[in-house]
Amino acid sequence: MHFTQTELQRYSRQISLPEFGLEGQRRLAGSRVLIVGLGGLGSPVAMYLAAAGTGAIGLVDFDRVDTANLHRQLLFRTSDVGERKVEVTDRVLREINPHINVTRYSERLTATNAAAIVEPWDLVVDGTDNFSTRYLVNDICVRLGKRNVFASVLRFGGQLSVLCAPDGPCYRCIFPEPPPAGSVPSCAEAGVLGVLPGLLGMLQATEAIKVLTGVGSPLVGRLLLVDALTMSFREMRLKRRPGCPACGTHSLPELIDYDAFCGVPAPKPRVAAEHPGPGKVGRLTAASLHQWRQDGVAPRLIDVREEWEHELVHLPGDTLIPLGTLGRAHTQLDPAVPLVLYCHHGMRSLSAAQFLVERGFREVWNLEGGIDAWSEEVDSSFPRY
Amino acid sequence: MNVRVLLFASYAEAVGSDSLQLELPSTARVGDVLTEVRRRISRDVPPSPMMARNAEYAELDELIHEGDEVAIIPPVAGG
């Protein structure tokens, strides 16, 4: 591995560390890290690993930037709302460091694709936000022999460990069974202090760099518990459990259906709606849209109302394109990408949807009853006007 | 015997404190601490948290001793 003068200059402050040195920089440049989940944890991990000169970074996330992400996911800006996370992250990482390679996986990690996605990488960073994917990440790391730099957060607390190292424990050694669905709230339900995932994410990035370069003693066989309220850091020693079905007895036959294992209801197909067709606008109820959003299958959302209406109340993650500007703005939209259009009561969005469908947009849904129906049927905290 | 219990995440929230003192019979095991704490909680919390005795992973059938510190660490999944 040969570095240019610019690269040497860029990394000089860490190359000058005797423990790190040129050798550490070379190892990092030859490393491939997969980051699963570009949320509060994954986004700082991605930025620090890119800046440090990690040779190749893989990004897995199916989601788009939502306004509710912005208080903790500093990689994303207000103007990124509605964009695909992997695309924004890719762009930002290249700006941070043009000397690295970035690979994008704009999809959900599943039992079907996990082996193919994880296989080419040296190390996995688990920045996911649900138990199903955490158990999946663990099991595939055990199977493929990849170390898993794990962290998770909720409210004011976090957990961190380097799992699946040779002779070290895996996630199932600590938590053999997932908790019953609903007994552990998500950050969306219970909240999270904005800076906390940043703190844990930076600890994750630190551990990833240590594992990859061989510098220091990684957090193997130890679980770090962080409490921001009292600002205490405690450590629990872990054991590799001989009876662990993943890394002990290897009795897990194949990757399983993790949603079922974790008691998560299977994502429902898009129902209670009339499908769009060629030249035909799809009809969608507020309740169905709500379900799609919960299931993570909702298409991109466009508000065609005026700016003041959008300011008054809007659905998180949407993009504002007032009806009057659609004639110009539609050329910026990809006709192949499914869209849901909404307005106040569903009339303006219907004419906007017809306009798009006539111009070859393949899948356009109209939210019937508009945001008013959302206030009435889904969330009464949405102000009506 | 007297045992100090450290509580994390949902267990700390459900108890309303991040630690408590328990008086247990001398034959008590790690699982008895969990049972006793869960008896005091009315909320739905993960039934199988990680247990640690003196800052080390512990199985439920492990005996505890006077002055031990037992920790209850439920999983969290947020990211």
Image: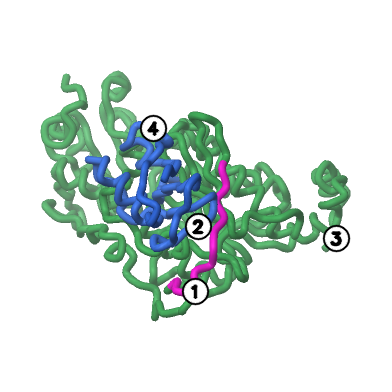
Q: Where on the picture, by quarter, is residue A379?
A: top left
Marks 3, 2 in one chain: no
- The chain ID associated with circle 1 is A
Q: Colour of chain A?
A: green
Bounds of the magenta span? Answer: A234-244
CB atoms of marks 3 and 2 within 8 Å: no
- How crowded pointer 2 is (Cα within 10 Å; few <14, some 14-19, many 20+) is rated as many
- The chain ID associated with circle 4 is B
Of A271 and A140, which appears nearest the observer?
A140
Tag 2: residue type? Tyr
Would residue B56 be found to the left or right of residue A261 on screen? right
Residue A320 percent across, percent down from the top left: 34, 31
Q: For mark 1, what is the residue?
A: A242
Residue B41 percent across, percent down from the top left: 26, 41
Would residue A256 be found to the left or right of residue A275 on screen? right
Of A91 and A23, which appears nearest the observer?
A23
Residue B17's disc number: 4
Residue under the point 32% across and 69% down: A257
For the residues labelled 4 and 1, the Cα–Cα distance comes to: 34 Å
Q: Main secondary structure of the magenta part?
A: loop
